[in-house]
Image (tube, rainbow, N blue to C red):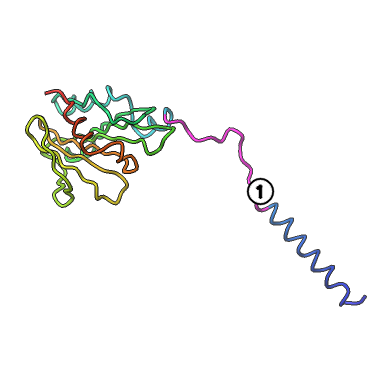
Amino acid sequence: MNLDKSKPLLLVLVLFGVFIYGLYVGTVNAKRNDTPKSFEELFPEIGYKSVAAAVNDFEHHMNQDLKLPTRVPPISFTHYFGRFSNLDGEINDTLEVKFISDQLPDHHFKIDVRPIQHKITIGKYKSKVFKMKNGTTATYIDDLKFGFNMLVFERDNWQYMFSVDADVSDKVTPEILVQIANSIDS
């Protein structure tokens, strides 16, 4: 057998073997029903429930009524959930209300409420200060590097923090967030 003539044949066989092996190793076996969970399934698994139930839990734990805004940003939402986080001690006890869309991921608005005695200090993040209709001030923060803008204000012994996705800041301006904050009944 002439070795020079068999080299191309050997090379072709090795390449063919590598190709077949690559096809076998690169194959992924997926289930036909392997779809992500819906928001209705996912959010309750991580502690979210209806806004009314979460507010009730929060008010009961804090022994104080809470008022939420009657307005929301002028963007579409498909879901809204609430979660009361009762962590060790009271310093991290918060109510979180999320407005989200499963159609438009940047349509995300969140309200965080905590007792004023455990408020988060935002002094170094100040961007703009707005006067609210009840005479208090609200601070708008848009220089965060986390992809969202915030409006922070205090009212009725609570600190409210409104967060909105920065990608919709052309539709949800600081002035609109102030209008939403002003919609809280006194």
Characterize the magenta stretch by its predominant secondary structure. Answer: loop
Q: Which residues are magenta?
A: 25-39
65 lies left or right of 79: left
* Whole-percent x, y for residue 162 in the image: 23, 37
4 lies left or right of 22: right
If the image is split into quadrants, where does the C terminus sit? top left
At horizontal 39% and vertical 27% (from top left) the residue drawn is 78
At horizontal 80% and vertical 65% (from top left) the residue drawn is 12
Residue closest to the far left: 135
Compare residues 8 and 115 and report the one nearer the observer: 8
* Whole-percent x, y for residue 98 in the image: 31, 32
Compare residues 153 and 48 and report the one nearer the observer: 153
Q: Please count the marks in the image.
A: 1
Which residue is tagged 1?
27
Residue closest to the far front: 170
Compare residues 102 and 159 and report the one nearer the observer: 102
Residue 27 located within the stretch drawn in magenta: yes
164 lies left or right of 24: left
If the image is split into quadrants, where does the N terminus sit? bottom right
Q: Helix, strand, or loop for circle 1?
A: loop
* Whole-percent x, y for residue 166 in the image: 31, 43
Amino acid under disc 1: Thr
Relative to 17, residue 166 above or below: above
Q: Quadrant of residue 184?
A: top left
At horizontal 71% and vertical 56% (from top left) the residue drawn is 21
Residue 101 located within the stretch drawn in magenta: no
* Whole-percent x, y for residue 176 in the image: 23, 33
Q: Badge 1, how many Cα within 10 Å: few under 14, some, many 20+?
A: few
124 lies left or right of 74: left
At horizontal 8% and vertical 29% (from top left) the residue drawn is 134
